[in-house]
Amino acid sequence: MVAVLAAGYRALGIGAPLGGVVLLAFLVALGVRRRRPAARRRLGYYSPGELLELDTQGLALAVARMLRRDGWRVRLLPAPDRPRLCARDSSGRQLDVAFRPVAEPLPDEDRPHPHMHHRDAEPHLQLVVHRGNFGDRDVRWALRQGKTCLLDGSSLRRWGQGTRLSELLTHGW
């Protein structure tokens, strides 16, 4: 590093080492800022402890940020009892995200918001997010539904730490 600054000084004068020091200071400040928890969460990275502390609305916001980090365009549909997300990626795939609170059965309802998807578009996927574990009954329900994927607590923690959603899910992604 010092050799580069010295060579820059000989070639360009005092501006090269000063510019190098300013650039280095900027990169250090940027690195420190990105490591702060709030900035890290805005970028879609969550620690396992942070995910556990979130309520259902907070979890919906976290999942929206993680989807955006993975390249999806996301709309949060706030609801007082059960938030939902609609997302679309650059290839046109559509994803509906539902959240399952702890100790509550999976919804046996139709796909959410059918009016929001175009008829000529590819069939959309449904993702059910749960901080706990899904049982055998839940897995059978998802298989019966078709394009429904279940994201349990361990996968959610890996996703929050930076693993892409497409690597976590194997159902037609």
Image (spheres, helix red, strand yellow):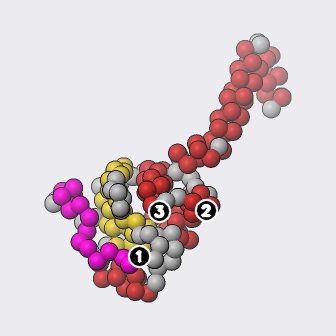
Q: Residue furthest top?
A: 13
Mark 1, residue position? 104
User: Left or right: where does residue 115 sit relative to residue 102?
Assistant: left
The magenta-colored residue range is 105-118
Name the element at disc 3: helix
Q: Nearer the viewer, residue 57 or 156?
A: 57
First along the sequence among labels 3 and 2: 2
Q: How far apart are marks 3 and 1 (CA)?
A: 24 Å
- State the residue at coordinates (52%, 74%): 132
User: Left or right: where does residue 63 sit relative to residue 82?
Assistant: right
Q: Residue 165 carries which label?
A: 3
Q: Residue 37 carries which label?
A: none
Q: What residue type is labelled 2?
A: Pro
Mark 3, other Cα within 10 Å: few <14 / some 14–19 / many ≥20: some
From the image, state whether disc 2 or disc 1 is nearer to you. Answer: 1
- Residue 85 x, y percent position in the rendering: 35, 57
Q: Nearer the viewer, residue 20 or 85?
A: 85
Q: How far apart are marks 2 and 1 (CA)?
A: 22 Å
Q: Distance between the residues labelled 3 and 2?
A: 16 Å
Residue 115 painted magenta: yes
Labels in figure, total = 3
- State the residue at coordinates (25%, 68%): 111
Mark 2, residue position? 48
- State the residue at coordinates (26%, 73%): 109
From the image, state whether disc 3 or disc 1 is nearer to you. Answer: 1
Q: Which residue lies furthest to the left in this view?
A: 119
- State the residue at coordinates (79%, 24%): 5
Mark 2, other Cα within 10 Å: few <14 / some 14–19 / many ≥20: some
- Residue 102 x, y percent position in the rendering: 47, 73
First along the sequence among labels 3 and 1: 1
